[in-house]
Amino acid sequence: LSDYNQALRMPDDVDSGFWLPPARLIVSASSQDTVRRLLAGWLKICDVTLYQLESLTCTPFRLTVKQWRCLLEQCAGGESSTDPNTRTGQRNIAVQKIFTDSLAKARLSLNMESIASKSPTWRSQALEDIIPDAVVTEVLWELCELNFRLELVSLDSYLDCSKMDKVDRQKLLENCWAG
């Protein structure tokens, strides 16, 4: 519950990071413009983020809800202050570093300015300024499903006592979604 109630501080030994932005981050945005901006930010980096999660040679990154919002805003061309004298600037710098370091470990590189200027795409189709409602629904559904899968795998790895090979165990879990 600490993650849902921003007034409560998360204990230091709890990793509150998410492999993907939680759909509630987007759904709970205060305006439709913010929803569309956050979605646009996600669509610009979803391919590279999913690639990192899928590849055994990559080191994916985990971000808190605030960090995900910050990254998605930056990718959408929104808040990009890097003034180290402000909290927002410090957070932006830290999130950019997490993102670019993760990409560098995977031998990938993306320039934040080029991401912000790129048009969002969904299913290989470039989207204009207004993202259709049907696409919004599909993206949110996919985020919910992918986050559920990742949480199931994490929970299983924590609770599994079978001594089964990790890759084999992951393949076994992936069969839950076959077809």
Image: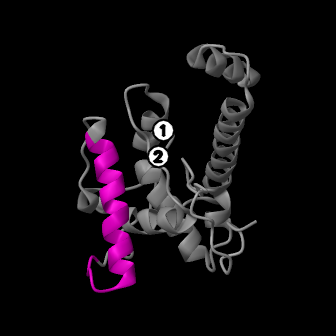
Determine the image quadrant of residue 15: bottom right
Residue appearing at x 29%, y 38% in the figure? 105
Horizontal side, residue 58 vs residue 110: left or right: right
Amino acid type, mark 1: Leu
Q: Nearer the viewer, residue 42 or 84?
A: 84
Q: Main secondary structure of the magenta part?
A: helix
Instruction: Tell me the colour scheme of the image.
Output: one colour
- Residue 60 in the image: above or below residue 64: above
Q: Is residue 37 visible?
A: yes
- Residue 49 in the image: above or below residue 177: below
Q: Is residue 130 visible?
A: no
Real-space CA distance between mark 1 and mark 2, rounded to the nearest whole angstrom: 6 Å
Q: Nearer the viewer, residue 7 or 26?
A: 7
Q: Is residue 98 found inside the magenta-colored segment of the image? A: yes
Residue that badge 2 annotates: 46
Residue appearing at x 55%, y 75% in the figure? 33
Horizontal side, residue 37 vs residue 159: left or right: left
Q: Are marks 1 and 2 in contact (CB under 8 Å)?
A: yes
Q: What SS does tag 2 mark?
A: helix
Q: Quadrant of the N terminus?
A: bottom right
Residue that badge 1 annotates: 50
Q: Position of residue 91 (x, y in %)?
A: 38, 72
Q: Position of residue 102 (x, y in %)?
A: 34, 45
The magenta stretch spans which residues?
Answer: 82-104
- How packed is label 2: few (under 14 Cα within 10 Å), some, or many (20 or more)? some
Horizontal side, residue 40 vs residue 74: left or right: right
Q: Position of residue 151 (x, y in %)?
A: 68, 41
- Residue 107 in the image: above or below residue 9: above
- How packed is label 1: few (under 14 Cα within 10 Å), some, or many (20 or more)? some
Q: Position of residue 131 (x, y in %)?
A: 54, 60
Determine the image quadrant of residue 21: bottom right
